[in-house]
Image (cartoon, rainbow, N blue to C red):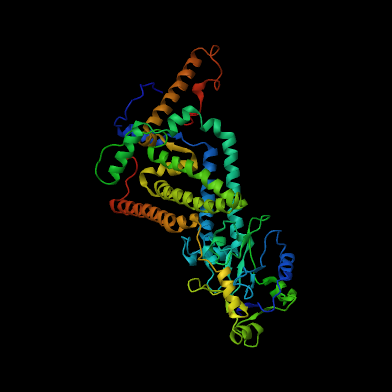
Amino acid sequence: MRTDAIPVDPLPLTAEQAESMLQRQVKKHHIAIILLHWFNAIVWFFELLTGLALISSPLFRVAPRWYISIVDGVFGTRANMLQFHVALGLLWIGVYLVYAIFGFRTYLSKEVIRNEIALDLDDYRWLVVRTRRILGLTREALPPQGIYNAGQKLFAFMVYAMIPLVMVTGVVMAFRLFGTQVVGWAVVLHFCAVGAVVCGLLVHVYMGAVFPEEKPAFFSMITGTVNELYAYRHHFKWWTVIKAEEQAWNQQHANEAVAPAETARPGSSSADREPGCPG
Amino acid sequence: MARYAMVTDLRKCVACQACTVACNAEWDVPAGYARTRVRTTPITGTFPHLASSIYVAQCNQCDRPPCVEACPSGATSQHDNGIVGVDKSLCIGCGFCLEACPYDARYINPATKKVDKCDFCVSRLERGAEPACVITCTAHAKYFGDLEDRQSDVFKMVYAHGARRLETSTIRVGPNVYYAGEHASTDLVLAAFPPRPPRLLAAGQAWSRVLRPLVLAAAGATFLGQAVAFFNQLRNGEKDFED
């Protein structure tokens, strides 16, 4: 492996380079994240399905009456449907709590917040250019992005804000806590928070499952890996991190080959983390 | 289908509260709450021409019940026989229906935190018994039956003897509890305990008038935007991501 200097900006690639990068997979998602993602997706599918049917008053409902009748029929009684909705919601909260307890050290480290969560200058420029490109106002290249692009980060911010609200209001309704005034507002907030997430979810599902440029991102949620070319083109700043890690790893192993007795065994070095898990 | 109704004869009622006790016992109503209660109007007039009336309050099983519309989850619903029932397993205790009821006939049970109210003892009706308050009434002042049955007591009381609904010119939701007696007495009851306009809690108003349209508009706009992007994608043909 060559230890070339890692470029600061994305350079044009030759056809050969592009082809070889296309064949190489790099790890993007940990298996725990993949499982959580699909568990989350299934929960949201069924919770939305039943939640839409649970609001039956003509003053408040958003689903047509025939839809409510069908879901009522599937569950037999509306009470069964509510029980299902509540039980699945509580299971969802439980699973999230387990992830929060075991994962917060990994996912809320300063490094992860800086590299994967916070918006930097390139992100703000990306949002402007992306919007202008969608509107057909420019063909300008998108500014380089980290492991998540600015759109994904904004979606994440909204989800971080809304998910606790959905959970808390859901628990308030399920156990009828703090009196009727609070429960009344909890119903409304639950609806609005879910509404906000659904708006983001429409974009999320479209970008993930339909939009052609992001197809590797969709499959990465199944296999955990993306090809290197996709990382280079769409998440350049993340690609430079992977490259630096690879080079450090190679460097260390080269040193070991020279003087095996003097170096620590592989695995103890901080440079030997798994690529794609910069946390 | 039946149209169940109840008639309370204010001339016979002696305000003994036997109906209240029977109801509380039948339905395990917690102390301080009631599905039905007997009240008296304030005394009016000057001596010796004083007037007062008894009022037996309970859910009226209205023809056009505002509580049904206010209930988000469908826990409160109107049965084909006219009875407005509460499915406790669906109630989330939001209290919208309490505000909606023009007769304030509902309460939140502090033990279950779910709503409760008179439902004409529907589970007793199902096994052929009359409502608990009717069979316990010491003065036989309460009549229960089917308004669509011309032989029933309630039919006769309402259509032959002028039993009256407690409605005002503005609040007309079609109550199915009627009051027999002097017109002056029912006038006193209406003056002392008039039905109030149905209210919607601030949360419900915000939801119905602002937030539901807002969320629908936002989701609709996002969906339309996606649809436009998708059709552009189909029109332009898919390019592989590597250009």
Which picture quadrant has residue B21? Answer: bottom right
Which picture quadrant has residue B209? Answer: bottom left
Q: Quadrant of the N terminus of chain B?
A: bottom right
Q: Position of residue A164 (x, y in %)?
A: 53, 43
Q: Quadrant of the C terminus of chain B?
A: top left
Looking at the image, is A260 positioned above or below residue A189? above
Spot the residue most to the front: B47
**What residue is at 48 percent from the left and 45 percent from the top?**
A162
Question: For this view, does B176 lie left or right of residue A237?
Answer: right
Res. A175 visible in picture: yes
Q: Position of residue A273 (x, y in %)?
A: 51, 26
> Closer to the camera, A156 or B69?
B69
**What residue is at 48 percent from the left and 55 percent from the top?**
B202
**What residue is at 36 percent from the left and 37 percent from the top?**
A234
Looking at the image, is B72 positioned above or below residue A231? below
Which picture quadrant has residue A226? Answer: top left
> Closer to the camera, A35 or B76?
B76
Number of disc labels:
0
Looking at the image, is B102 positioned above or below residue A7? below
Q: Position of residue B114 (x, y in %)?
A: 63, 58
Q: Position of residue B31 (x, y in %)?
A: 71, 58
Res. B176 visible in picture: no
**What residue is at 68 percent from the left and 71 percent from the top?**
B121
> Closer to the camera, A113 or B86?
B86
